Image (spheres, grey):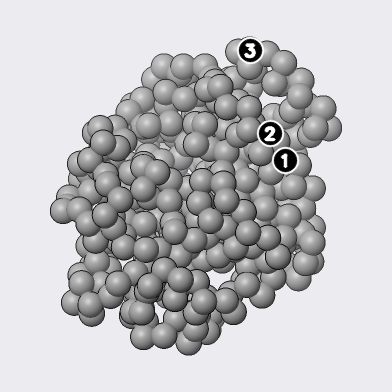
Amino acid sequence: MSTINYLTRIEFGEGEIARLPEFLAQLGVKKPLIATDKGLVASGLVSRVAGLAGDAVIFDGTPANPTEEAVVEAHRMYAEAGCDGVVGLGGGSSLDLAKAVRLLTGHEGPLEQYTAISGGVARIHGNICPMIAIPTTSGTGSEVGRAAVIITADGRKLGILSGFMLPSIALCDPELTYGLPKFLTAATGMDAISHCLETYMAPAFNPPAEAIALHGLDCGLGAIEKAVADGSDIDARRDMMVSALEGAMAFQKGLGAVHALTHPLGAIRELNLHHGTLNAVLMPAVLRFNREVIGSKWDVLATRMGGSPDDVIASLNSRIGMPSGLREMGVTEAMMEEVSHAALKDHCHATNPRLASRQDYLDILTASA
């Protein structure tokens, strides 16, 4: 087993979930709020984790795209029960909701004032409760990310970013992903791969992040089809969790146009679209859009991926069962028009290597339809 200190503390390995009582004691947490979802409650995993967490309180109302309303409700439970720490258990939605609950343990609402586009980074401080993040998917890497992406009270899907948002401990046990269905394995896996690709292309100077992103990309591309085909493939599940972890470790460097689009797409309440699936569908068009400005990075990616990156991702999407396009997912032309405007205001817009206009975003959406 390995203890890694890069941004935050990571405890990684099969069976590490059994050490949860030890980690809670180290953080001085005696009564944690477990933020999770009803699917994991039904699977029995929540009761297993709660049994390790002592006098725990369970909030299982995390939506597929976490909302400020759900965050406020979970924080109410936290305060009324006298909790002293947060455990996020689940995919990126539960982990992001847990981070936002943690933020409210030391900050007054509403959440919009802490979003990156509102200058919220400077308003966030470290006087908040401890948190352990336990991922049950291999996708967002939220367990080592400094952001929580929340649909705020005004209906926008926005990022709250700060180094103080990093969980105290990321508890990464690949065994918790063994039962993940094929489609979720594919969709979350493409989320991880998209993080590796976008952060590598982002223009900021951060060689360690680029190296980590490339290794995460290698792991993800090498393992995703194996993990989709056989969910009990131990090596594939481990490599996919590494890919998710490294994609998020690296995206402190910045993401790009894919995420500038998927955040407002994910905020469309009537569709409730899966973030990783959206990333997969949009990635080929964004790669083509960026090609002319990323120079030798395109060649590096082509060599590592075994072909033109846009074609490799498009082919992979088809093989692992991703939707053929946005229209298949219910996205209309009117929605694309609205999203193309909203993408310009997303915090990921500025870190794409080629600055996009509203028309550029609309063209990417149309090409992905």
Question: Picture coordinates of residue 320 (x, y %)?
Answer: 72, 52
The image quarter in which residue 194 lies: top right
Separation of residues labelled 1 and 2 (CA atoms): 6 Å
| Residue on which the image places disc 1 | 215
Q: Residue at x 52, y 76 (%)?
A: 22
Q: Residues within 10 Å of mark 2 (few under 14, many from 20)?
A: some
Q: Amino acid at mark 3?
A: Glu
Give the vertical position of 85 relative to 362 (above or below): below
Tags 1 and 2 touching, CB below 8 Å: yes
Q: For the residue labelled by badge 1, is the local secondary structure a helix, a strand or a loop?
A: helix
Dot 3 or dot 1, earlier in sequence: 1
Say what amino acid the circle numbered 2 marks. Answer: Ala
Q: Residues within 10 Å of mark 1 (few under 14, many from 20)?
A: some
Q: Amino acid at mark 1?
A: His
- Disc 3 crowd rating (10 Å Cα; few below 14, some 14-19, many 20+) is few
Q: Is residue 320 above or below residue 62?
A: above
Residue occupied by mark 3: 292
Q: Quadrant of the N terminus?
A: bottom right
Mark toward the viewer: 2 or 3: 2
Task: Locate residue 344 relative to residue 124 in the image: left or right.
Answer: right
**Which residue is under mark 2?**
211
Query: In the figure, is residue 235 to the left or right of 133?
Result: right
Give the mark count. Answer: 3
